[in-house]
Image (tube, grey):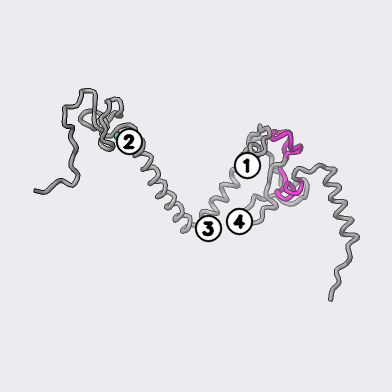
Amino acid sequence: MRRRAFPQVRPLLQLEENMKICRICREEKLLECFSKDKGQKDGLRSLCKPCDVKKVRANRAKNMDRTKQRWAERYQNNREKMISQQQARYIKYLERHLVYAAKQRAKRFNVPFDLKEEDIIIPEYCPILGIKLQPRSVDSNRDGSPSIDRIRPELGYFKDNVVVMSYRANRIKNNGTAEEHRKIADWMESKICNSAQPVLQ
Ligand SMILES: [Zn+2]
């Protein structure tokens, strides 16, 4: 006689009216431990709520891997196109990107933040270096890309304390005071004037 590969476990004793056995964990549980399911004869899921949750999580993880893989393949196959789309989106929503990045920095540096997209005015040229401001392309030089600077860094991000300048100017300025920058400039000039000319052979 052939045995069934997956014999159904039947309760030996008649179950209490308010109990049901979970298909997965095989535990006898109260009916309220099962979610409703109109497709079932008794109107309840065949697996208990904890098993249901586990199953949903496992499926989600499995699908996530598949989704990630599909995205990676799509990116590989359409790299150029996707980069230019990404770039176009970046330019279109530039103010939003700048505000979002500033918000992340505010969190990181633990300074106040109260900026809206409409507070951001992007000039054509960097107010410090005079270079033309151009949103960076995804993998090229960032020097001319607009960035938000805090006039007084410790006060945080709000409309009257921010200026959009080139990434390069912002990076150089950093959190130095005017006095410190003057000292750096003076020092650089004196070094360059006094340094010996390289001997060419
Ligand atoms: Zn169960």
Is 106 left, or right, of 197 in this rendering? left
Q: CA distance from mark 1 to mark 3?
A: 25 Å
* Count of numbered badges drawn on the protein: 4
Residue at disc 2, CB closer than 8 Å to ligand 1: yes
Side of 35 where 92 appears, left or right: right
Which is closer to the viewer, label 3 or label 2? 2
Q: Label 3 amino acid?
A: Glu
Helix, strand or loop status at disc 2: helix
Residue 144 in magenta? no
Q: Residue furthest top?
A: 17
The numbered disc on residue 51 is 2
Residue 172 among those drawn in magenta: yes
Q: From which residue to which does the magenta span run?
A: 150-173
- Tell me which residue sits at (81%, 42%) in the image: 177
Q: Which mark is residue 139?
A: 4
Q: Say whether residue 45 is left or right of residue 149.
A: left
* Dot 2 or dot 1, earlier in sequence: 2
Give whichever of discs 3 and 2 has the lower sequence position: 2
Indicate which disc, 1 or 3, sits on the residue closer to the N terminus: 3
**The disc label shown at residue 101, or none:** 1
Q: CA distance from mark 4 to mark 2?
A: 47 Å
